[in-house]
Structures are given as structure tokens and as C-alpha cells.
Amino acid sequence: MTVKTFMTSLLLLILYSCTSQVENKEPIENPVTKLPNIIIIYTDDLGYGDIGANGATEINTPNIDFLAQNGIRFTKGYSSSATCTPSRYALLTGIYPWKNKRAKILPGTAPLIIDTSILTLPKWLSGKGYNTGIVGKWHLGLGNGNVNWNTKITPGPNEVGFNYSHIMAATQDRVPTVYIENGYVVNLDKNDPIEISYRENFEGEPTGKDNPELLKMKWHHGHNMSIVNGIPRIGFMKGGESAKWKDEDMADYFLSKAKEFVKNNKQNPFSSITLCSNHMYLELHMNDLKENQD
């Protein structure tokens, strides 16, 4: 064998060896892709015995029951607070709400009560590679006070650390009765700007107290101010007709937005915190009632 032939054979052998190593090499997994997805469903006024897994019979909760049967159940738990704003504050910040005098049940015009410079749960998760989203009730304040609802509303959930947010500002029984996506009121007509007050009514606007003939449900303590969708609210609101929600559709609406976030992020690790719940009353479709009766 000549030197030329030997060198050619050696070169081919090396090339084949390198090619084989590349082809047989196992792919290196990105540690981020192995992170478990996280969904937190956070509700107001949910008692231990309100779900089927814990013995409830009045309302069917098959999906929650499925999670309980196929996951880990915690039957002894403690809460940082028994009310909405304080418990949400503690969940997102890890700080006892009694350490922040503003962490109490807030009006819809309250400024953001979370310091945007601190490490929050969504910020920590984002740092680990998660896409974070929040859908539903917020009730932790927005802006710095005296919010202009007709421009971008900031600071809010996004500044606290969420990559995506689709929320109501406070509660279902308080104004403003609009959805807010990433800082902007959904479906707002710029020619019909929103005005909000918790001090006095706007001239010519009906209220639950003065116009009971416009109501489809009676008002009770404090819920006798602006009327939206036939329901008396806490606080006064003018304008924003095209952006106002319909209470009967709220549960389905927020559910669709939560599912949309999950679908859009299913290729990457995601954390979705769904704070979708209501105060005082809950408007339902008749078919929802029928399903529960069946």
C-alpha cells in the first residue's frame, strides 16, 4: 500500500468516525423544557366542603375532583388572610399582608399596592424560564392613583412580573366594569371615554338607589350606585359602553382567556395564575343552572 493510499484511507476512516459520533450523539435537553407547567386557581370564599372531592353534593366539580384523585391532596392548610386583596398580596409577594397597611379590600380606583422593585412570584418564575400569565380578578390596585382608564394603565400586573395579563381591576360588584388586557381596556371606544368616581355620581347617570325600575336584581348594603347590565354596583361610572362586561358571560370569558394563554405557551414552560372569582353575587346562564341540577 502506498503512502498516498494509506493517508486517503485514514482520512476516510476519521471522517466516518466523526460522522458516526455526530449521528449517534444523544440530543442535549434544555433544562428549561423539563420544567413542569404550573396553574394556580385562586378563588374567593371557597370553603373546604364546596368541592366534590371533599364531599360536596350540591354543585358538581368533576375537573377539580379529577385533579384531587390523580394528584396530591393537602387536607390541612393555613391562609395568610381570609379576604381577597390581603391573601392575593401574600401569594404574589410572600409578605404577610399585615405588614402593608394598604393590603386591605380596595376600591376600583386604588393605586397598585405591590412594590414593583421587589421579587415577586411571577418575577421569580420568569427568572427560571417560565412564561407567566394572570387571568381574572386582580384587586391589588392599578397605576399610581387617579387612573386614566383611556390610555395605558401602569403600573399593574405586567410591572409586577407577569408576561401577560387579562384582568378586571377590582371585583365584579365594583366599577370599572371592564376587562383590561396588558394595561389597556378591552374594546374601548375612544369617543366614549371612561370616567370613574367613588365619591360622587356623574350628572344625569342613574343609580340603584334612585332608579330601582332599571334593576334586574335588588341592591343591598353599599351596592346602590351606578347600574351596569341591570346590576347596581359600588362606585360611579360613566362612559365606556362598548367595553362593559356582561356578568353572565364572565366565567366563560375568563376561562377562554386562560385556555388561550395555555395553548399559546404549550411549547414552553408556563405558569398561569387564574384569580377568577366574584364578590357578593354570581350571574349565571340558565343552562349553567340546568347542568348543575342535572
Image (spheres, rainbow, N blue to C red):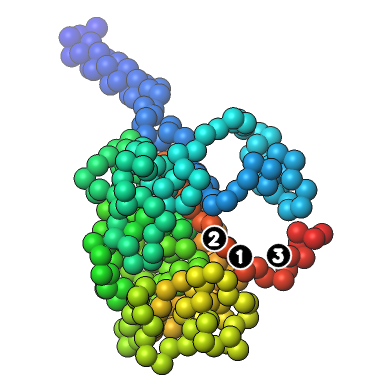
Residue type for callout 3: Asp
Point out the tag, 3 or 1, that comes first from the N-terminus: 1
Residue visible at 54% across and 50% down in the picture: 43
Pick the quarter of the image with the N terminus: top left
Q: Position of residue 107 (x, y in %)?
A: 39, 64
Closest to the camera, between mark 3 and mark 2, is 2
Dot 3, crowdedness within 10 Å: few (<14), some or many (≥20)? few
Question: Which of the two residues, 2 or 108, is positioned nearer the viewer here?
Answer: 108
Q: Which mark is residue 11?
A: none
Q: Position of residue 182 (x, y in %)?
A: 34, 62
Point out the tag, 3 or 2, that comes first from the N-terminus: 2
Q: Position of residue 78 (x, y in %)?
A: 52, 34
Drawn side of residue 93 relative to residue 207, left or right: left
Tell me the CA gap for discs 3 and 1. Answer: 12 Å
Q: Is residue 153 visible?
A: yes
Residue type for callout 1: Leu
Residue visible at 20% across and 9% down in the picture: 2
Residue type for callout 2: Asn
Pick the quarter of the image with the C terminus: bottom right
Dot 1, crowdedness within 10 Å: few (<14), some or many (≥20)? few
Q: Which residue is mark 2?
A: 278
Drawn side of residue 75 relative to residue 141, left or right: right
**Element assignment for label 2:** loop
Query: From what the image shows, is residue 196 above or below residue 288?
Result: below
CB under 8 Å between discs 1 and 2: yes
Q: Which residue is mark 3?
A: 288
Q: Which residue is mark 1?
A: 282
Tell me the CA gap for discs 3 and 2. Answer: 16 Å
